[in-house]
Image (cartoon, rainbow, N blue to C red):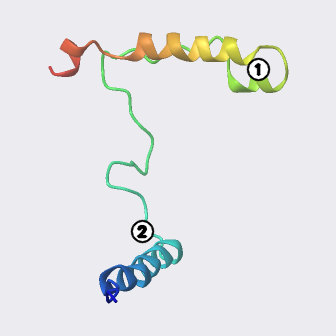
Amino acid sequence: MKEVRTSSTSASIIPVVGLLMLAGVFFDPGPAAAQGLGDCVLPEGANPPTEPHTTAQDVENGSATLKDFSLAARDQFKVGSPTPEEAFF
């Protein structure tokens, strides 16, 4: 009869992962380094983004459809996004 071997590695990893997850729940690491704590100041010469035509609030109160919102979000993204050439310079 063959002897069945169990792996002690997988059994010991489960409690370690559980403890890491538990530590992540109870300890607040604070904001990430990329998250600013203050207001974002618009650089000189830059124009502020235009207001969207349809907002999520419009969808919630029934004055617009979800399709209107998704199309407006797509258009807003296209307008506010740099071209690949602009992104690298």
Query: Can you give x and y, in whole percent of width and height, for residue 38 in the image?
Result: 43, 47
Nearest the viewer among 53 and 36 is 53
Instruction: From the top left corner, tell me how far across and down residue 65 is, in percent.
Output: 76, 15
Question: Which quadrant is home to the C terminus?
Answer: top left
- In depth, the one of 17 and 45 nearer the eye is 17
Q: Considering only order in the chain, which callout, 2 or 1, is on the residue closer to the N terminus? A: 2
Q: Residue at x 36, y 17 (%)?
A: 81
Decide if residue 3 is on the left or right side of residue 24.
left
Task: Decide: is 57 above or below 27.
Answer: above
Residue 28: x percent and y percent? 48, 71
Q: Number of labelled discs? A: 2
Q: Decide if residue 84 is on the left or right side of residue 61.
A: left
**On residue 69, which mark appears?**
none
The residue nearer to you, when weighing 7 against 18, is 7
Viewer-nearest residue: 20 or 7? 7
Label 2, residues with CA under 10 Å away: few <14, some 14-19, many ≥20: few
Give the residue at x 47% y 76%: 27
Q: Amino acid at mark 1?
A: Asp
Q: Which residue is mark 1?
A: 58
Q: Secondary structure at mark 2?
A: loop
Q: Residue furthest front?
A: 1
Which residue is denoted by mark 2 in the rendering?
Answer: 29
In the image, taking residue 32 as reference, residue 89 lies left or right, namely left
Q: Could you classify mark 1 by the number of other residues whose Cα lies within 10 Å: few (under 14), some (14-19), or many (20 or more)?
A: some
The residue drawn where x is 33% and y is 48% is: 34
Identified by mark 2, the residue type is Pro
Task: Label 1: state its secondary structure.
Answer: helix
Q: Residue at x 16, y 22 (%)?
A: 88
As measured in the structure, the alpha-carbon distance from the residue carrying label 1 to the one carrying label 2 is 36 Å
